[in-house]
Amino acid sequence: MADPLVDNNNGIVEATLLTGAIRIELPLYIFDGQSFEEPIRQLEKEWTRLLEQAIEDRQRPNGLQVQRMWAPIDLYDHRIAYLELSLCRVEQQASRLRLAAEASGYFADIFDLYEHLCNLYRRHLANAHTQKEKYVNKLKTSQA
């Protein structure tokens, strides 16, 4: 079996195309007789540069990635604001209900529900702060 390309000092001397049992001698004029060494080196340098750049680009987020990283942070900011406002309102209602319960002796069962609701809002609020911090830290580490 013949080699498809025979070279001498990086120049093509003979070229053969083999497909199954068919052997075709390619004319040498299609290969301009020049050495492939320098173009291959340039191609190798360019590929190396492109591959290194791709790694750097993946490590450094672009504008769209940063914008996408900010989106959950903004959502958690809105959620935190909503939960703080809701907790404040529930605490005000619980305070009014406590005064009414002390004065009349009624509403004690409802007051327990308000306390449970306040605790629930506090847990959700703490969770929202924790989740927001995770996204903020992720954003900081990606930009470092």
Image: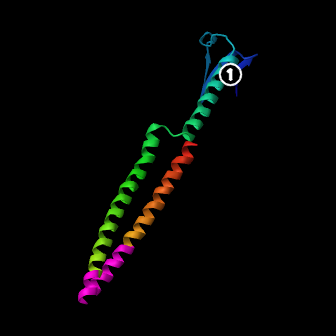
Q: 18 above or below 55?
A: above
Residue closest to the far right: 9
Residue closest to the far bottom: 105
Kindly indicate the quadrant of the structure image that contains residue 78.
Answer: bottom left
Q: 117 above or below 55?
A: below
**Residue extent of the magenta highlight:** 99-119
Kindly indicate the quadrant of the structure image that contains residue 100.
Answer: bottom left
Q: Is residue 102 left or right of residue 69?
A: left
List the residue tagged with mark 1. 41
Q: Residue at x 36, y 63 (%)?
A: 84
Q: Residue at x 39, y 74 (%)?
A: 119
Q: Does the stretch in magenta take in 86?
A: no
Q: What's the residue type where badge 1 is placed?
A: Arg
Callout 1: 10 Å neighbours few (<14), some, many (20+)?
few
Q: Nearer the viewer, residue 20 or 70?
A: 70
Q: Residue at x 46, y 59 (%)?
A: 131
Kindly indicate the quadrant of the structure image that contains residue 118.
Answer: bottom left
Q: Nearer the viewer, residue 128 or 102?
A: 102
